[in-house]
């Protein structure tokens, strides 16, 4: 089929680019920081053409040279182009049919030339309006072109043939997916990328995603003028600007401290260099509206999201996957609330155990503030200690065990909410629960008279959790017959004093206690003697007099 225009005609109207035009195009191509930004430009053109879907197709073919050829085809079902549009706008730098149309994203007539950023051997454009013949345009690296009539069609396909070796296909496809997801994440049209691998297998990827993540944390507001605002409290600040789902600009500068914002407005535009959003009246009004939404509605939304996340922790099975995920979400939402500046008084907190005579659900900051004697307590997981505290009416906040990064950041934030009062429940309280094995009973029977000989009136083994669990023993006024809460004074109390001795409880999880119990199964006298000496050594009470008394007591029972 004969061409409409062909640079081989060498006529005055030849499509071959002049030196100044070539220089201008080359400089415009270089201003695209991302060589795959042509995906954004082609999707943008498809949206402006009224497309309902865009298909990206990658296929690699071997060639006679060492590299091979990657064929990149971007197809849309939009309105297509006429010969007048192709010759009068598409192929003319700085000329656009959309310049004065507020419903279009593109304006400057430079985006299409971004296809040359990947150094293709040839670029073809097949297009048609659905009536009459279609068109086929061929563009060469020197910016010369040929336009011929083609079979009827509706829509446009732009194909780039890029030299590429076989080993680089996978990486190129991944870069293409990343570029499309960066530049075109929330467009209203369907975007799919299909890669035909050299072995013939087909790999398909969906690119577009909803503007509303529906995660319970993000506030999404749709306005009558077609603008959309997505706001989320976050420790990582960011602002992104879109026009109908096409990314125009992103920055780490926040519209408000502690906020991630996505602003999508149909009249926002990018600068001619494509690296920023135009700072015009539309931009100023959109940013002002986003700030207004953040200061009022987002704050209310965050408080509600924290309460919901706390409730999910309470309802989830603590040691199951749902419990781990719920704790991770609460930690994320709570820390984000802190970064956003939500006052601690507005927050609610999940508990590891329901409080006696209280609500089994989350508790308010005010409720935790009232526990002056115990302070504001937190724990990594449920334990016999937290159960006992809850039974005594003391709430303990669940901060997670560190799974999915839940613990440290939340502990820091909890401390900020309760300055000088927040503490780990196991660092402030302990629990001694009497329990023994047969070997421990045998050991206690021999150990009791030995310790009595040096002034310690009683001994028992116990499971100690929290405060005091790192010690070999603790001294109490009386041996517990039921689980007993311990405080700092209890674990620091010496077994021997000016007014007599106190009975001791030995922590059965300490290494020395375990070794003594094991030895007692075969030699209880030696085990008891060694353990008694260890108790005296631990309290700096092993003087000559007590050592002599201990030896004599041991010999009497030999």
Image: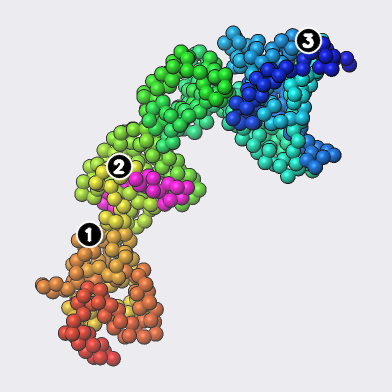
Residue 212 in the image, given as x and y percentages of width and height: 52, 27
Residue bearing mark 3: 13
Residue at the outermost front position = 19
User: Whole-Å distance between the Cαs marked 3 and 1?
Assistant: 94 Å
What residue span does the magenta drawing correspond to? 389-412
Which labelled disc corresponds to residue 293? Answer: none
Label 2 sits on residue = 416
Q: Residue at x 21, y 89 (%)?
A: 552
Q: Earlier in the sequence, mark 2 or mark 3?
A: 3
Would residue 429 appear left or right of 329 to someone viewing this image? Answer: left
Relative to the observer, which residue lies in front, 63 or 483? 63
Q: x%, y% of residue 258?
A: 39, 32
Q: Earlier in the sequence, mark 3 or mark 1?
A: 3
Residue at 72%, 26% in the rendered image: 74
Asked if residue 413 is positioned above or below residue 233 in the image, the reply reads below
Give the answer, above or below, for where 230 lies relative to 331: above
Q: Residues within 10 Å of mark 1 (few under 14, many from 20)?
A: few
Taking the spot 33% from the left edge, 82% from the top edge, the residue there is 527
Please tell me whether residue 319 is drawn above or below residue 290 in the rendered image: below
Q: Circle 1 sits on which residue?
A: 488
């Amino acid at each position: 089929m004969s061409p409409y225009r062909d640079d081989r005609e060498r006529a005055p109207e030849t499509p071959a680019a002049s030196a100044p035009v070539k220089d201008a195009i080359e400089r415009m191509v270089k201003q695209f920081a991302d060589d795959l930004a042509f995906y954004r430009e082609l999707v943008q053109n498809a949206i402006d053409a009224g497309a309902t879907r865009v298909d990206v197709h990658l296929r690699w073919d071997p060639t006679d040279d060492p590299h091979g050829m990657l064929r990149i085809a971007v197809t849309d079902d939009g309105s297509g182009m006429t010969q007048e549009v192709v010759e009068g706008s598409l192929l003319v730098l700085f000329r656009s049919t959309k310049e004065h149309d507020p419903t279009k994203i593109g304006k400057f007539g430079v985006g299409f030339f971004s296809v040359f950023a990947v150094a293709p051997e040839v670029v073809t454009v097949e297009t048609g309006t659905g009536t009459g013949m279609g068109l086929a345009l061929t563009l060469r690296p020197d910016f010369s072109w040929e336009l011929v009539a083609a079979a009827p069609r509706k829509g446009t396909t732009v194909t780039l043939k890029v030299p590429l070796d076989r080993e680089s296909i996978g990486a190129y496809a991944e870069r293409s997916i990343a570029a499309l997801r960066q530049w075109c994440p929330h467009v209203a049209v369907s975007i799919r990328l299909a890669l035909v691998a050299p072995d013939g297998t087909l790999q398909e990827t969906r690119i577009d995603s909803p503007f509303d993540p529906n995660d319970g944390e993000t506030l999404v507001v749709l306005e009558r003028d077609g603008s959309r605002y997505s706001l989320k409290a976050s420790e990582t600040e960011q602002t992104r600007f879109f026009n109908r789902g096409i990314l125009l600009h992103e920055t780490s500068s926040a519209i408000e401290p502690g906020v991630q914002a996505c602003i999508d407005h149909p009249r926002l535009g990018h600068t001619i260099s494509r690296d920023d959003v135009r700072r015009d009246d539309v931009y100023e009004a959109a940013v002002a509206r986003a700030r207004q939404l953040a200061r009022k509605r987002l704050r209310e939304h965050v408080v509600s999201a924290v309460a919901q996340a706390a409730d999910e922790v309470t309802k989830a099975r603590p040691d199951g996957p749902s419990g781990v995920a719920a704790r991770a979400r609460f930690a994320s939402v709570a820390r984000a609330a802190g970064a956003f500046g939500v006052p601690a008084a507005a927050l609610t907190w999940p508990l590891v155990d329901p409080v006696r005579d209280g609500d089994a659900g989350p508790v308010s900051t005010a409720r935790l503030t009232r526990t002056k004697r115990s302070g504001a307590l937190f724990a990594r997981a449920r334990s016999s200690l937290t159960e006992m505290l809850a039974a005594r009416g003391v709430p303990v906040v669940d901060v997670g065990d560190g799974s999915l990064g839940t613990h440290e950041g939340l502990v820091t934030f909890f401390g900020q909410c309760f300055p000088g009062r927040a503490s780990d429940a196991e660092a402030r309280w302990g629990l001694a629960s009497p329990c023994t094995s047969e070997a421990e009973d045998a050991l206690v029977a021999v150990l009791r008279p030995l310790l009595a000989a040096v002034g310690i009136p009683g001994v028992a083994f116990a499971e100690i959790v929290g405060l005091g669990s790192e010690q070999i023993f603790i001294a109490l006024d009386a041996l517990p017959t039921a689980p007993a809460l311990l405080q700092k004074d209890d674990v620091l109390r010496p077994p021997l004093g000016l007014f007599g001795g106190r009975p001791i409880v030995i922590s059965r999880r300490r290494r020395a206690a375990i070794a003594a119990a094991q030895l007692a199964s075969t030699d209880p006298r030696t085990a008891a003697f060694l353990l008694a000496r260890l108790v005296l050594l631990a309290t700096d009470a092993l003087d000559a007099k007590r050592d002599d008394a201990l030896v004599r007591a041991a010999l009497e029972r030999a």
